[in-house]
Image (cartoon, rainbow, N blue to C red):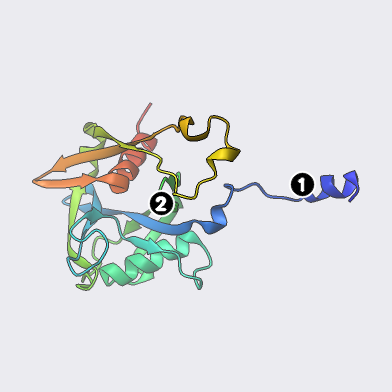
Amino acid sequence: MKIKSIVNKIGNHTPAILSSEQFAKFAVLLPLIEKNNDIHLLFEVRSHKLRRQPGDICFPGGKMDPHDKTAQATAIRETTEELGISGEEITDVHPIDYLVSPFGMLVYPFVGVVNHSANIEANPEEVEEVFTVPLAFFQDTKPEIHHVSMYVQPEDDFPYDLVAGGQDYEWRPLKMEEYFYMYDGRVIWGLTARIAAHFAELIKER
């Protein structure tokens, strides 16, 4: 292979997150809705019928389907399926910063406006209930931040003989921040709380 060929290949390459094709990709929508002349964020309580994270509070969303052309299409599709509304009742959809989870997930959040007169009928197979929180709460409230430490445990057949230091190699533990909001007896935490905090920071008047 000639240098020019290598340079051309690299020059035509669009950078992405290394190995991101192996990541599970999800998209969520932060639904803004007018309520009592105020702006609220809409949340879901996950159905207790679900295998993963039953009872947790989240934004509408889910895993990208092969038929979804974009992450935004996923966020809108999942929101319509979970809230029982049409896509026409969701407007002004825009992306905010995406997250790379230490558990091998890419999460693409979007902000969109849900028509205040939309007839929301949550899908009971996925959603236990729906509630809203005034946007001002997130603008005025700092989340509690707690830390979770995760430690590396190599498999039994790990080739220590190929690593400098062998079995005494010092693996660096991963420390993860977990965000928490407490509102009206509810606990909003994890990625959902982190995305909400990020959104509140983005729209802060500086």
Which residue position is annotated with label 1?
Answer: 10
> In the current view of this chain or complex, which residue is farthest to the front?
161
Mark pair 2, 1: CA separation: 30 Å
Task: Say if mark 2 contacts mark 1, CB within 8 Å.
Answer: no
Indicate whether 149 appears above or below 96. above
Q: Position of residue 10 (x, y in %)?
A: 77, 47
Q: How many marks?
A: 2
Classed neighbour count for the residue bearing mark 1: other residues with Cα under 10 Å, few (<14), some (14–19), many (≥20): few
Residue 89, quarter of picture: bottom left
Residue 88, quarter of picture: bottom left
Q: Residue at x 50, y 46 (%)?
A: 158
Does residue 108 appear left or right of residue 196 in this picture? Answer: right
Which residue position is annotated with label 2?
Answer: 109
Q: Residue at x 23, y 65 (%)?
A: 117
Q: Along the line of sight, which residue is nearer the eye, 19 or 12?
A: 19
Indicate whether 54 appears above or below 198. below
Q: Position of residue 84 (x, y in %)?
A: 27, 72
Please state which amino acid type lies under the numbered disc 1: Ile
Would you say residue 143 is visible in this rendering? no
Q: Residue at x 40, y 61 (%)?
A: 75
Does residue 69 appear left or right of residue 111 in this picture? Answer: right
Q: Along the line of sight, which residue is nearer the eye, 3 or 124?
A: 3
Please state which amino acid type lies under the numbered disc 2: Pro
Mark 1 lies on a secondary structure that is helix
Q: Residue at x 39, y 60 (%)?
A: 91
Q: Nearer the viewer, mark 2 or mark 1?
A: 1
Classed neighbour count for the residue bearing mark 2: other residues with Cα under 10 Å, few (<14), some (14–19), many (≥20): many
Q: Along the line of sight, which residue is nearer the eye, 103 or 117?
A: 103
